[in-house]
């Protein structure tokens, strides 16, 4: 395994870190107090600066205007950008577009690529991913009630989804719907592109999540698909392969989140250490002198390093041996990194006392927004079961 960072990559990372600190940290108080749409003009200006620096879309293919970095290189980029809630958006590699881009690039027809992929990578449009349903468990995505029934050259889609992140203002959704109800469990659904101005694509509401309704990219919608008709040519990949595509989308997608979380951990760690060395707990005594506080810092340092190395190892495995070979590692880092993230953010908040609860630092935002890390892209329990099953399978064949 080789994690040496090239000189060129080192320069890129330094440029990105400097940009995030100088240009994005100062915008965060506004991000916390305003609607996303109010901030969009200034974010557009920052995106223009990023394009000028030739740092736009680091993960996406060069042929479409991205930087075409490898997954291990992107791990370092997501870490550098993830420390600010605005980092990935401003550099054009934010979820859910990043996962949709990978699927479109791999499975899209030439027509789909020209119409959806190219403007998506260019940042001219946004997209969303509509899989989770209100009535059925999202943790079991092979069980869907949303149907796409063939009618002439079209599919007619009916279903009730929620948590379709960033649907507000998106140009299109990639929807998971059952097209082959008679097939075996893993071969029933397909992914279908639905432009959001299609009649029957009805946004019920932006859901209030942890006290935040949100708008634009920073929101999660509930959607009713009511006789929503799209051409069959909008299907992505072969019919019935939606679950297979979802595994491909969510595999690297989970890694992207984990990498971003390391960035959040680093930011919170930095804030907690800076505060501990300056905040007095008694006349002439700084908080950092307390053994309890030292243990928070030592535990956080060890856990962040462990999670970081696991993430890099998984990225390396995907890059060198493919997603399938890395399935156990992807599940391992998903629940492990989410747990580290929550412990580190919680300690940072604790060390800041009352200040940690305010919106004067980004810690309280991370505390609220990142609780979901243990839920989206696979709940902890399912990943733990999957890891244990893979490990135990090897023992089942062994003699006692
Ligand atoms: C902030 C956020 C953003 C999201 N964005 C998107 C998006 O863009 N697109 C999209 O389609 N979805 C999205 N989701 C939905 C997410 O993928 C689902 O919430 C997730 O898959 C869990 O599904 P569920 O909420 O239906 O919980 P359920 O499946 O009902 O599970 C509830 C709980 O049951 C337990 N449980 C479940 N299965 C098992 C098991 N096998 N063994 C033991 N315990 C179990 C776990 O404790 C779990 O938390 C998002 C969710 C959040 C919170």
Image (tube, rainbow, N blue to C red):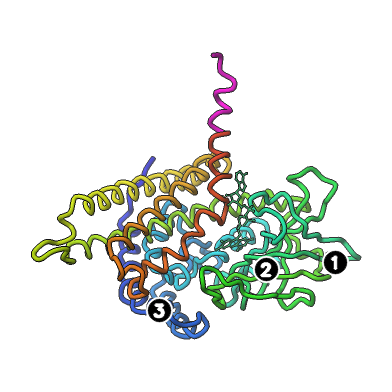
Instruction: Tell whether 117 sits left or right of 68.
Output: right
Is residue 3 positioned above or below 42 on the image?
Answer: above
Dot 1: what SS? strand
3D distance between C-alphas at marks 3 and 1: 42 Å
Q: Which residue is mark 1?
A: 154
State the quadrant of the C terminus: top right
Q: Position of residue 303 (x, y in %)?
A: 34, 47
Query: Nearer the N terminus, badge 3 or badge 2?
Result: 3
Q: Nearer the viewer, residue 141 or 89?
A: 141
Residue occupying the far right of the picture: 152
Q: Residue at x 67, y 59 (%)?
A: 132
Q: Which residues are magenta?
A: 390-400
Q: Which residue is mark 3?
A: 49
Q: Which residue is mark 2?
A: 173
Dot 2: what SS? strand
Quadrant of the rendered structure where residue 124 is? Answer: bottom right
Does residue 383 appear anywhere in the picture? yes
């Amino acid at each position: 395994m080789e994690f040496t960072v090239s000189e060129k990559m080192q320069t890129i990372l330094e440029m990105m870190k400097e940009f995030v600190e100088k240009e994005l940290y100062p915008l965060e108080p506004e991000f916390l107090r305003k609607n996303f749409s109010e901030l969009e003009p200034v974010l557009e200006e920052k995106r223009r600066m990023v394009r000028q620096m030739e740092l736009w879309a680091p993960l996406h293919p060069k042929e479409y205007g991205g930087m075409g970095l490898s997954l291990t290189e992107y791990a370092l980029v997501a870490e550098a950008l993830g420390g600010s809630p605005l980092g990935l958006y401003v550099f054009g590699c934010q979820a859910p577009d990043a996962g949709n881009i990978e699927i479109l690039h791999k499975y899209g027809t030439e027509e789909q690529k020209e119409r959806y992929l190219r403007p998506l990578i260019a940042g001219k449009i946004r997209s969303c991913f509509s899989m989770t349903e209100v009535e059925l468990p999202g943790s079991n995505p092979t069980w869907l009630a949303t149907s796409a029934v063939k009618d002439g050259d079209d599919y007619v889609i009916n279903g009730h989804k929620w948590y379709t992140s960033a649907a507000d203002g998106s140009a299109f959704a990639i929807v998971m719907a059952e097209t082959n109800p008679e097939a075996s469990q893993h071969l029933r659904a397909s992914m279908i592109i639905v432009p959001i101005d299609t009649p029957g694509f009805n946004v019920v509401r932006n859901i209030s999540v942890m006290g935040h309704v949100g708008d634009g990219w920073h929101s999660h919608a509930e959607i009713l698909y009511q006789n929503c008709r799209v051409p069959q040519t909008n299907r992505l990949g072969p019919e019935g392969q939606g679950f297979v595509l979802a595994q491909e989308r969510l595999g690297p997608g989970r890694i992207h989140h984990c990498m971003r979380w390391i960035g959040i951990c680093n930011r919170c760690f930095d804030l907690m250490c800076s505060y501990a060395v300056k905040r007095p707990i008694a006349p002439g005594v700084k908080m950092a002198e307390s053994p309890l506080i030292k243990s928070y810092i030592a535990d956080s340092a060890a856990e962040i390093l462990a999670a970081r190395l696991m993430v890099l190892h998984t990225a390396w495995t995907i890059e060198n041996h493919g997603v399938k070979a890395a399935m156990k590692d992807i599940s391992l880092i998903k629940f492990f990194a989410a747990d580290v993230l929550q412990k580190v953010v919680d300690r940072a908040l604790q060390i800041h006392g009352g200040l940690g609860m305010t919106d004067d630092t980004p810690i309280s935002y991370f505390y609220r927004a990142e609780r979901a890390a243990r839920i989206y892209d696979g709940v902890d329990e399912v990943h733990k079961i999957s890891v244990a099953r893979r490990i135990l399978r090897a023992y089942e064949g062994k003699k006692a």
